[in-house]
């Protein structure tokens, strides 16, 4: 029987171990960093009438516009229903346009309006300030290592099922 060999982990990282240390757990620290990152940012972007969901959508749209709703949801890390509800508000505010795809009218494409692009630039500047705060004291090599490690975790979790 071919059993998948588990990598040897220090006991304090393994949730099944008696020596597990939650506060040193990589995923606890990732979640904690994400929480702290968004705690201040959420307050700052709220001044523009933007919440975290809308921020995610706007930042993706700034880089990929037009884009269909399925891809927009995927890249925004949102459920499609959540993205669709937020898109209603974005459209009402005049920040986006939605149009049927010319090649396939079952697909709706979303793009920023000039008003939406202007707003997105403002909130992304706040995101930039927050990022600079978060990485203060890290050099370029450390940032490369950090992003490389995080990409590795994402890749592993994207292809390996827990069961």
Image (tube, rainbow, N blue to C red):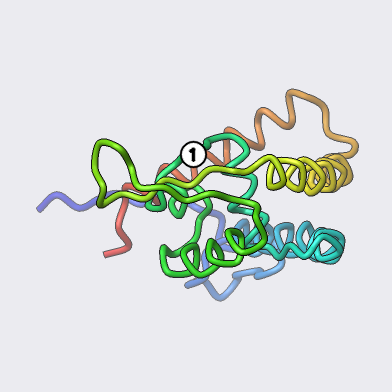
At which x and y percent is residue 146? Answer: 66, 37
The answer to whether residue 113 is above or below residue 95 is above
At which x and y percent is residue 155? Answer: 42, 42
The answer to whether residue 9 is above or below residue 146 is below
Residue drawn at x 67%, y 61% is 93
Q: How busy is the neighbourhood of tag 1: few (under 14 within 10 Å), some, or many (20 plus)?
A: few
According to the picture, the residue beneath numbered tag 1 turns out to be 152
The answer to whether residue 127 is above or below residue 11 is above
Residue drawn at x 68%, y 47% is 116
Farthest-out residue, top:
141
**151 or 93, nearer to the observer:** 93
Q: Along the horizontal axis of the image, is 11 left or right of 138? A: left
Q: Along the horizontal axis of the image, is 158 left or right of 31? A: left
The answer to whether residue 109 is above or below residue 46 is above
Element type where label 1 sits in the image? helix
Residue drawn at x 32%, y 47% is 159
**56 or 10, nearer to the observer:** 56
């Amino acid at each position: 029987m071919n059993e998948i060999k588990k990598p040897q982990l220090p006991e304090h990282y393994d949730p099944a171990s008696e020596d597990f240390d939650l506060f040193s757990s990589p995923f606890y620290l990732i979640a904690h960093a994400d929480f702290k990152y968004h705690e201040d940012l959420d307050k700052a972007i709220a001044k523009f009438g933007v919440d975290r969901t809308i921020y995610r959508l706007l930042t993706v749209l700034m880089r990929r516009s037009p884009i269909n709703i399925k891809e927009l949801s995927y890249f925004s890390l949102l459920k499609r229903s959540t993205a669709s509800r937020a898109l209603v508000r974005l459209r009402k505010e005049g920040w986006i346009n939605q149009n049927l795809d010319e090649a396939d009218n079952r697909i709706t494409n979303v793009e920023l309006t000039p008003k939406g692009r202007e707003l997105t630039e403002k909130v992304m500047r706040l995101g930039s300030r927050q990022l600079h705060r978060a990485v203060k004291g890290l050099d370029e090599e450390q940032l490369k290592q950090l992003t490389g490690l995080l990409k590795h975790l994402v890749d592993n979790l994207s292809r390996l099922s827990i069961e």
